[in-house]
Image (tube, grey):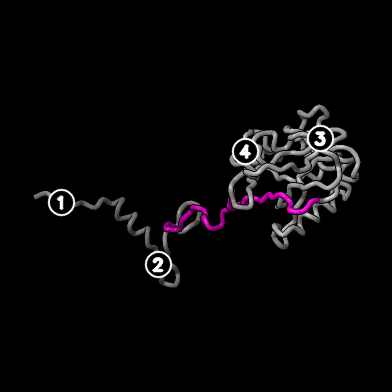
Amino acid sequence: MRPRHILSASLITFAIAGCIPSDNGEETPETDAGGQEGDASTEPDASTEPDVGTTPPLTMFLSSGTYETSLGLASLDAACGQEAKATAGTSYKVLVASPARLPANPTCETPQEASDWVLAPNTTYQREDGEVLFTTGASSIFTDWPMENLFSNSGANFATGMDRDWCLIPDQHCSGWTSSEGRAAVGWTASGDGGFLEGGDLGCGGRVFVCVEQP
């Protein structure tokens, strides 16, 4: 009668090789070709992999107070940080363009290079209530109008100094926000398209500004 199971010589050899006594009499576990124990995992530990895309959205709000356009950028930025809406310990800047504050934009009539710009690249910006406004691209601007939500349902003009393409408007930035004389390009909070940045122009002097949280 034919046996049901036959162990070949090669299988017996493999079984013996898999458990070779060490010099101290203990069994040495089999290792793979790379010198690792046969049951060790070679997959990377997911807990050590860097987090991607976890940066929280940054907040933008309209200043409650009006500020003189002659204060200069540093003082206007500081005023945003003193607003009641500002989070303590967080830095803010005013959303304006000037010869000293520009986003990189080669499509402007006078091509712009980035300088002290207030928006970060590839970052989502939201209102105070958490509703998303827009997400910037690699150039730290947003061009895919309209925005996802209106900045505000009630309209108000705020100083910007730029047009809907984020380009500085000559002679409409109150001499780089150092003068109360001249004109200021203004945006409109109730516009979801480019009018959010370019909604006309008003005289320099006391103006409200949009404050932007910094990363």
**Residue highlighted by disc 3:** 168
Q: What residue type is labelled 2?
A: Glu
Q: Sort mark 1 into few (<14), some (14-19) or many (20+) by Cα contacts within 10 Å.
A: few
Q: In this view, does 181 lie to the left or right of 193?
A: right
Quadrant of the rendered image containing residue 103: top right
* Mark 3 and mark 1 residues within 8 Å of each other at the beta carbon: no
**Residue highlighted by disc 2:** 27
Q: Is residue 184 left or right of residue 124?
A: right
Q: What secondary structure is found at the residue carrying circle 4?
A: loop
Q: Which residue is at a point 60% across and 45% down the rendered structure image? A: 132
Instruction: Please state the horizontal and vertical placement of residue 209, each as a whole percent of the image.
Output: 76, 47
**Residue highlighted by disc 1:** 4
Which is nearer the eye, 182 or 122? 182
Instruction: Please state the horizontal and vertical placement of residue 205, each as a whole percent of the image.
Output: 86, 45
Q: What residue type is labelled 3?
A: Leu
Lower position in the chain sequence, tag 2 or tag 3: 2
Q: What secondary structure is found at the residue carrying circle 1?
A: loop
The answer to whether residue 171 is magenta is: no
Q: Which residue is at a point 58% across and 48% down the rendered structure image? A: 131
Lower position in the chain sequence, tag 4 or tag 3: 4
Q: How far apart are the alpha carbons under marks 1 and 2? A: 31 Å
Q: What secondary structure is found at the residue carrying circle 2?
A: strand
Q: Which residue is at a point 63% across and 45% down the rendered structure image? A: 124
**Residue highlighted by disc 4:** 147
Which is nearer the eye, 116 or 83? 83
Depth-wise, is mark 2 or mark 4 nearer the camera? 4
Look at the image and give the residue range highlighted in magenta.
Answer: 38-66
Instruction: Please state the horizontal and vertical placement of residue 190, each as a whole percent of the image.
Output: 66, 40
Q: Is residue 112 left or right of residue 120?
A: right
Lower position in the chain sequence, tag 2 or tag 4: 2
Which is nearer the eye, 46 or 157? 157
